[in-house]
Image: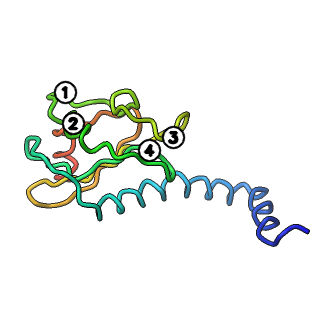
Amino acid sequence: MVSYYAERDAEYERIPTLSIMRTLMRLYIFPVTAAFVILLCVGCSKNTGGVQVVSAAFGEYTNFTDVTPRVQGLLRLQTGFQVQTGILQADPFPYYHKVLVIVYLDNGRRHIFTASENENVSAEILLQAARQ
């Protein structure tokens, strides 16, 4: 006997719009949720030219890794860095596209910055995002 939920899920998969909406929810809800979880956590903060990184997480879906110390070090570089598994020295969800979520302080105000894989991040970019 097939359960009600299994039948419902099978029916949802046959409706293209609902399938697309479900996929979008998976892609965007979890990074936002992770950002709020990070926001609640107390992390180390070091001064990096006006930007103090509270915490940073790298991953996707429900698999995130704390990369706070690594991001703090990389933000000291004048050129910044590119969001990649090799550079961040973490791959919490192999073969899937991942995001970097950074919670930082600028002039005492908390901000959240999200960057996808292969995007550039620097202290200057974070400061510009905080001013918008």
Q: Are marks 2 and 1 in contact (CB under 8 Å)?
A: yes
Q: Kindly report the distance in space between the C-alpha atoms of the residues bearing marks 1 and 4.
A: 23 Å
Residue on which disc 2 sits: 122
Q: Nearer the viewer, mark 3 or mark 1?
A: 3
Q: Position of residue 40 (x, y in %)?
A: 29, 65
Q: Position of residue 97 (x, y in %)?
A: 50, 38
| Amino acid identity at mark 1 | Thr
**On the rendered structure, is 111 left or right of 22?**
left
Q: Which residue is mark 1?
A: 79
The answer to whether mark 4 and mark 3 are in CB contact below 8 A is yes
Identity of the amino acid at label 3? Answer: Phe
Q: Which mark is residue 93?
A: 3
The residue drawn where x is 81% and y is 72% is 4
Q: Earlier in the sequence, mark 4 or mark 2?
A: 4
The answer to whether residue 74 is above or below residue 130 is above
Q: Amino acid at mark 4?
A: Gly
